[in-house]
Image (tube, rainbow, N blue to C red):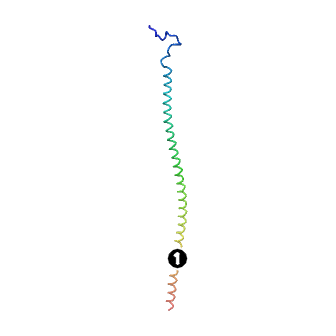
């Protein structure tokens, strides 16, 4: 069997094995670069989610303000409707009372006429 000429050299001058260490370093560097790229993509996704979350928060605050104003308007309208209902009931009662007084006046007039006609 033939021996490699490199093995015959003293260890201090022998060439290093063919880039075993450098290939592992390159492999690690490639993995780290891929991880960095994945982290960049993940970071961009997190930034988008944060932005969407802030937009949702602002929209929710805006909607809550609108709902508060709407609730106040509904309360005021409900109070106004109750007051107008009471007013309408009072008008109805006073209208009925007015017609009763007219009927009483007509009946009194008829009675007075009957008395006058009956005395003649």
Residue visible at 52% across and 76% down? 98
Residue reaching furthest top?
Answer: 1
Residue 90, image x, y percentages? 54, 70
Vertical side of 60 occupied by 94: above or below: below
Image quarter in which the N terminus is found: top left
Hey, which residue is sitting farthest left in the picture? Answer: 1
Q: Nearer the viewer, residue 39 or 61?
A: 39
Nearest the viewer among 14 and 58 is 14
Q: Give the labeled residue for mark 1.
A: 98
Q: Residue at x 50, y 27 (%)?
A: 29
Residue in the image at 51% along x and 84% along y: 109
What residue is drawn where x is 54% and y is 69%? 87
For the image, the number of numbered tags is 1
In the image, residue 60 sits, relative to residue 99, either above or below, namely: above
Q: Which residue appears farthest toward the bottom when viewing the image?
A: 120
Along the line of sight, the residue nearer the viewer: 82 or 72: 72
- Residue lying farthest to the front in this orientation: 13
Q: x and y percent of residue 61 in the render?
A: 54, 50
Q: Position of residue 115 (x, y in %)?
A: 51, 88
Q: Residues within 10 Å of mark 1 (few under 14, many from 20)?
A: few
In the image, residue 3 sits, relative to residue 57, either above or below, namely above
For mark 1, give the secondary structure: helix
* Residue 14 higher or lower than 79, as above or below: above
């Amino acid at each position: 069997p033939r021996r490699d000429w490199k093995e015959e050299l003293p260890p201090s001058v022998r060439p290093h094995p063919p880039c075993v260490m450098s290939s592992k370093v390159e492999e690690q560097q490639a993995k780290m670069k891929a991880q960095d790229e994945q982290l960049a993509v993940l970071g961009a996704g997190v930034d988008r989610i944060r932005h969407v979350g802030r937009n949702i928060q602002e929209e929710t605050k805006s909607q809550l303000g609108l709902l508060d104003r709407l609730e106040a308007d509904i309360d005021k309208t409900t109070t106004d409707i109750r007051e107008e209902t009471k007013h309408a009931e009072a008008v109805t009662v006073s209208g009925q009372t007015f017609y009763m007084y007219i009927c009483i006046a007509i009946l009194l007039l008829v009675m007075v006429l009957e008395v006058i006609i009956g005395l003649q």
